[in-house]
Image: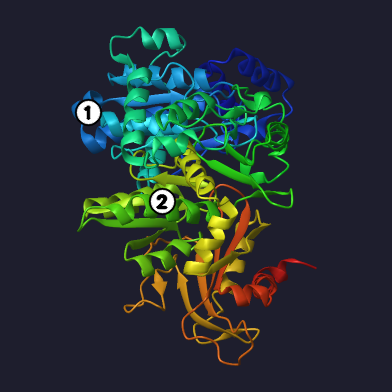
Amino acid sequence: MERMAMESYCKWELNQTLVKEVRGWLAEGNGKGFDRFKSRLQFGTAGLRARMGPGLDRMNTVAVMQATQGVLKHIEEKLGPQNGTSRGIAIAFDSRHNSEVFAAVTATVCLRRGFKVLFHDTPVPTPILAYTAKLRSTAAAIMITASHNPKEDNGYKLYGEDACQIIPPNDEAIQKLIEENFEPWSDYSDASINSVTSNKLCSVVTNDVVREYLKEVTQKLHRVASEINSASPRIVYSAFHGVGAKYVKLVFEKFRLPEYIPVEEQLLPDPDFPTLGFPNPEEGKGAMELSISTAEAYGSNIILANDPDADRLAVAEKQENGQWRLFTGNEIGALLGYHLWEVEGQNAPEGQKFCMVSSAVSSKALGAMAAREGFVFLEALTGFKWLSHVALEARSDGIKPLVTFEEAIGFMLADVVYDKDGLSAAGVAAEMVAQCYQSGMTLSKRLSQFYDTYGYFIGYNGYRVCSDPSTMRMIFSRLREYRAGGDIDGTKIHSTRDVGAGTDTAASDGKSDLPTGGGTDFITLRLSVDLLGTGKPQEAPNLILCYRASGTEPKFKFYSELCCSREEVDGGAHEKLRAIVDSTTEHAVNFTTN
């Protein structure tokens, strides 16, 4: 079976270096390389993402060709052939190895099928592709990127006709159609950027789309007076060897902000990420080392950084003690929400309703703010494929989304792009900095002001590696032993939510308000913690503990947040939080250890 798959692969693969490698394995005749052909990449809501190389379980031109054929069949079945082909497919790529080639193959498959293609012929950020889908109302949009994954990886990200990432059951339908359309529909050997852009069905749209993107970002998000922005402290910016630098510069120009100070070593696209072992600004101060040294050299107190495809934003600030603080995604979400509510929400026309949205594993700080200020706070499952849909449903009900975010430093501001967008977030963050420093505050002091007003929200997140599905099932079986009304080491369990089972004991009807489905491992425990030792735990829960199985990594993840007062923080709330979370987590996983 594997030998037949390898022979077929060699006929279809366009990269002759990979073909030569597979033919070498076949010639050896000892089963070498067979493991690469035992299972295929599965198309999910995140599309495809994997190590590049030869094989059915790797990213290569065969995987891209097969995925695109499945996607086009899905569009034809869902929208009808004529509607799908006329609305067209938007396609873009980042600066990773093979991204341009994969984009050319994707476009070639679309063009040969008669689909109009709206093409970006140079590397662009993921938010620009997502905006193309929204602006031009395409039948779908495909971005070739692996975001912040290691340099050996690449991916294929799909947006549907609503310009949002696809959600179930579309992923399963596409996977089935991929399996039914493995063989190439045509000879794609001439796939190249030149052959794509010379096709009469293809339009190169980058300049027009970027112009419209900047216009809408400015209209919807530029809220700080230009004289304040022009006096802003200089900000250090890193593109993490990705594609964000040019576009953040354009956003800064539109917002009348001073030009940023670039981290020169990481400014230009480089698919090898030579200064970074792992090109993810979430990785902490180690990943920000060059940014910090640049800021120190220029006397700057603020750093902004995008990941390589510029859909995420990291923010750091130098503290009074000389140390650098890298804000968490939850903290940045609170700061952006506080800022946009002040500059827009409080100045809106009478009757205008607003909402802010976070993922179920992210901070509820904006929920506390919503309760005080009177706007709507909504929750979604993890990932912007869910977050964007929730925000847009609210918009269709006349409720304007201001901030939609997840703790993994992803931010969708207003509804410029129906996905996380590190470009617009960089512009708004820079305006927030300008306003703070103009009023004599720092970002850290501004965050403390938020906490003093709405409560302190402290978190403790982590994960355990778990690659065995049966072990993962046992872990969640143990978590389901916790019941509402019970306790964890004396701490009362207020309520529980089991998304897979569709239940929530806090809801009046006992049902979860998050999308449910068999096999969804996501459990929430809400607890009432007596932080001051009064012997009388509060009635409402003040600790939320979430557990989920990662959809992209072999990990069992936990997220926790404790809402408390400054007095409780000073009284050991952090230590109490860790103790409860560690106790609960160990109960779930301790059967796996000797």
Left or right relative to 302: residue 94: left
Give the residue at the far right of this rendering: 594
Please name the residue that numbered disc 1 is placed on: 81
| Separation of marks 1 and 2 at Cα, in angstroms | 34 Å
Which x, y percent locates residue 332?
A: 53, 51
- Which is nearer the N-term, disc 1 or disc 2? 1
- Name the quadrant of the N terminus: top right
Task: Using a 10 Å C-alpha cutoff, classify the residue at mark 2 as few (fewer than 14 neighbours), some (14 to 19) or many (20 or more).
Answer: many
Q: Which mark is residue 404?
A: 2
* Residue 386 visible in the displayed image: no
Q: Which one is nearer the viewer's eye here, 160 or 189? A: 160
Residue at disc 2, secondary structure: strand
Q: Which mark is residue 424?
A: none
Image quarter for residue 176? top left
Which x, y percent locates residue 445?
A: 58, 57
Q: Are marks 1 and 2 in contact (CB under 8 Å)?
A: no
In the image, which is nearer the foreground, mark 1 or mark 2? 2
Name which residue lies at 70% across and 73% down.
575
Q: Which one is nearer the viewer's eye here, 205 or 337? A: 337
Which x, y percent locates residue 205?
A: 34, 19
* Badge count: 2
- Name the quadrant of the C terminus: bottom right
Residue at disc 1, secondary structure: helix
Task: Using a 10 Å C-alpha cutoff, classify the residue at mark 1 as few (fewer than 14 neighbours), some (14 to 19) or many (20 or more).
Answer: some
Image height check: is 509 above or below 549? below
Name which residue lies at 32% across and 38% down.
163
Amino acid of disc 2: Thr
Name which residue lies at 68% across and 68% down.
589
Image quarter for residue 38? top right
Amino acid of disc 1: Pro
Which x, y percent locates residue 565?
A: 56, 74
